Every structure is written in C-alpha cells, then in structure tokens.
Amino acid sequence: MTEPLEEETTPGSLTKVPPRAWYLVLALTMLNVLGMGIIFPVLPFLTLRYVSGGSLALWVGVLESVNALCSFLVAPFLGGLSDRIGRRPILILGAFGAAIGYVLFGIGGALWVLVVGRIIQGLTAGDMPALFAYVADITPAADRAKRYGFLGALSGVGFMAGPALGGLLARISLSAPIYATAVVALLVGLISLVLLPESLAPENKASKLKLAELHPLKVIRDAFTRKGLTGLLIGFTLITIPFTFYVSNVSVLALDSVGWGPTQVGLMVSGVGVVDIIVQGGLLGILLPRIGERGVVLSGISVQAIGCLGLALCASVFQLPWLLVAACLLLAAGEGGMNAALNGMMSTSVGPDEQGWLAGGVSSIGSAIQMVGPLLAGWMYAVVGHAIPYWTGLVMILIAGMVFVRIRPRREPLPA
C-alpha cells in the first residue's frame, strides 16, 4: 500500500514525501549522535597511548582541529552540492566516509594514523547539515523550530546511550568503542541508501553549482553580510566557542579535577543526553508558544552562563564531582533548547532553494570554530591555567546574550 504524502502548506516551498521520511530523519539523527557519543569518553585515553600526559589536552585539541579544518574546507561545497543534486547523496557519502575514518582511528598504531582517520571523517562530514536541510525541505517554516527540537531530543537519546556504551565498551579495549562507531556510521549509510526518499523537489534545486561561490571564506562572508542573518550568526559564533571549549576539554577536566576514567565520563555525558531529551523533547514544546524562539534563545544563554561558571569554579577552586556534573548538565540544557530555536530563526531567513547553502555556511562557521577552539582551549588549559577556557567562555556567553537582546525576530518567513 502506498504511503500518503505530507501536504504542502506553501506552494513550491515544500516537498511532498511519505510520512516515513520524517521518522527516518529522526532515526538517522539519533544514530549519528549515538556514533559521536560512543567515541566521546575514550578519545583522550586513546590519544594518551601516543603522547605524554602533560601534552594530552593539546593533542586532543589537535585531533579535533584537524577534523574541523577538513570539514570547514568541504562543508560549503557539500551544502551547495545538496542544493543542486539533493540531500540523499550527501547523506550517503558522509556516512560511509565516517565509517572509513573511524576504522582507521580504531586501528591506530601511531599518532599519524589517528590524524589520517580524523582527516577522512572530516572531509566527508556533510551528513548533519544535509539532515537539517532535509528537515527544512519538508517542514513549514512555522514548525521548523519545533521539529529541530525533536531532532535535538532524539540526539539526546543518542547522546545518552552513546557515551555510556562507549564507556562500557572501553572495558573490552579502548579501540572497541571506535569500531562500534564505525558500525553505526555504516548503518546510517545503508539506511540512507535503501530507505530514505529524496527531499529536494526538482523545482527547488539550484540551477547550477558555482564553485567560485562555494569557497568557505566567501560563504562565511556572504552569510555574515546577508540581511537578517548577520546578528544571528554573530550570536551563534559567540555562543558556539564556549561550548566547543567544553566538548573538547571536559574529559581532560574530569580526569584532572576529580580523577575520573572513561566509564565515569561516559555516564556523566549520558546524563547530558537525558537533559537534552527533557529540554528538547518536552520543555521546548511548552516554551516556544509562550515566549517564542528569541525568548528560548535568551533563556538558554542564561542557563549556559551558570553552567560555564560552574565549570570555571570546578577547575579552579571547588574540585567536586557533583559540581562538575551539575555544571555540565546546565551548560548542555541551555545549549540544547537555544540551538533548536536558533536553527529555526536562521532557516526562516533564507529561501527554500538556499537551505543547503545556509546549512553549509553554518557548518563552515562551526567547523572554523572547532578548528581553532579545541587548540585554543587545550593551550589555555595546559599553559595558562585549567580554569581559563571556562572564564573566557563565560565572558563570550554574556556578550552573546547582549547581541541576541538587540535582535528582533522576523515576523514572516521569506516567500518561496
């Protein structure tokens, strides 16, 4: 029996797809985050095989920065290509590329092999931006923030199960979580290849692919100068840098401040996933109709500021496990709700044939931050002081709050 198609609400702006497409997007998002979560608690301990303890934070930053550099270079091209040929081929490429990169990382044997694995995974890192563009293709503008919230909640499920699974698999060997991540990426690729329909309607495809327009620096410049996006992207940049500090360095902080290993780190990050589910799966649906996307963004920034303050205190004065856990949960809770609302605000600022361009541009900005952020956090942590990344992050969060206070949301989405 043929599945009914989702109805268009704005002529020419949405693609009619079977309802199963939305559920497949949810499943793919959860699997993506599950794979990333599995590797999260073991990355520093795997790297420690090849470096001295004093340089661990810096080398973890190097591995993350190399990955982000490659993603930064290719994300605009993959985003533009998805506007031209569709989202599905990019999802398939990203998933199978990630599987190859993770297998090499698991094999290891030398530090340069880890670097090569991260390079391959970074060069094919186009799956998450393509997934977000996919959602924009099939979702009315007014419902995008809510659906991005659902994606965030499902990400929370993956982020809850992934680190716990990674911590448990680490008891077998430090490489076991990496191979499990490769299997998850392979599963994402197979689902995209066999089951997922294309979301980009022929009439919404870009007429041609202009490579000169897809240089990452040009894409970033164009995005920052686009009316309606400038303030949003400045705020996004300021709020993403502190979260990058946290993600790249929290395992090292947990090791140094409270003496935790991969299992404890994995369980803590699983708690972050539970908070994501609560915030994005339930609380976001209550808050959006009452205070709107901008209100959710400002509320999320306030909660993030408290969490970042807690991490700074844990790194400098109060080396207490409960304070580390509470700070991580608050930082993640604020980021989760804020990110979904901000994605909704940005997606309604461009047309239906530019969703891939936007996703690629935002991904490039994020990759540029991830390219510099882990190195900066590792250097500040190792050389200047363990608390400095978090005090710096707190200042940036407060500045981001001032930026978003000045932004007035668009009342109507751009016409198709």
Image (tube, helix red, strand yellow):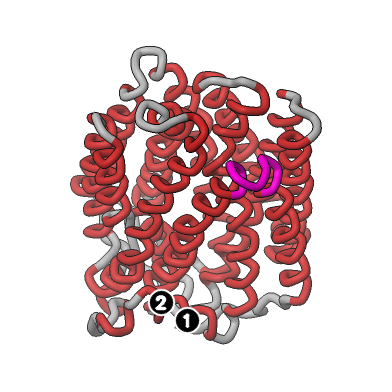
Q: Residues within 10 Å of mark 2 (few under 14, many from 20)?
A: some
Relative to 252, residue 228 above or below: below
Q: Which residues are magenta?
A: 380-388
Determine the secondary structure under disc 2.
Answer: helix
User: Residue 175 appears at what percent x and percent y?
Assistant: 31, 24
Return the x and y of residue 191 as percentages of the image width and height.
Answer: 25, 43
Side of 125 relative to 387 (left or right): left
Residue corresponding to mark 1: 221
Question: What's the residue type where badge 1 is placed?
Answer: Arg
Which image quadrant is residue 42 in? Answer: top left
Identity of the residue drawn at 76% across and 37% down: 316
Nearer the observer, 33 or 413: 33
- Examine the structure image and report whether residue 199 is included in the region drawn in magenta: no
Which element carries disc 1, helix, strand or loop? helix
Say whether residue 191 is left or right of residue 305: left
Who's the residue at 21% across and 41% down the image?
100
Residues tagged 2 and 1 counted as in contact (Cβ below 8 A): yes
Query: What type of secondary structure mainly makes up the magenta span?
Result: helix
Q: Is residue 35 above or below residue 412?
A: above
Could one spot residue 249 in this view of the protein? yes
Q: Position of residue 290 (x, y in %)?
A: 77, 59
What's under tag 2, amino acid-wise?
A: Leu
- Can residue 195 be seen in the rendering of this structure? no
For disc 1, the neighbor class at 10 Å (few under 14, some 14 to 19, many from 20) is few
Query: Which residue is tagged 2?
Result: 217
Taking the image as shown, residue 245 lies to the left or right of residue 404, namely left
Quadrant containing the C terminus is: bottom left
What whole-number distance in Å separates the C-alpha atoms at marks 2 and 1?
6 Å
Q: Residue 133 lies in what quarter of the image?
A: bottom left
Task: Please identify the quarter of the rendering in which residue 49 is found.
Answer: top left
Residue 314 x/y as whole percent? 74, 34
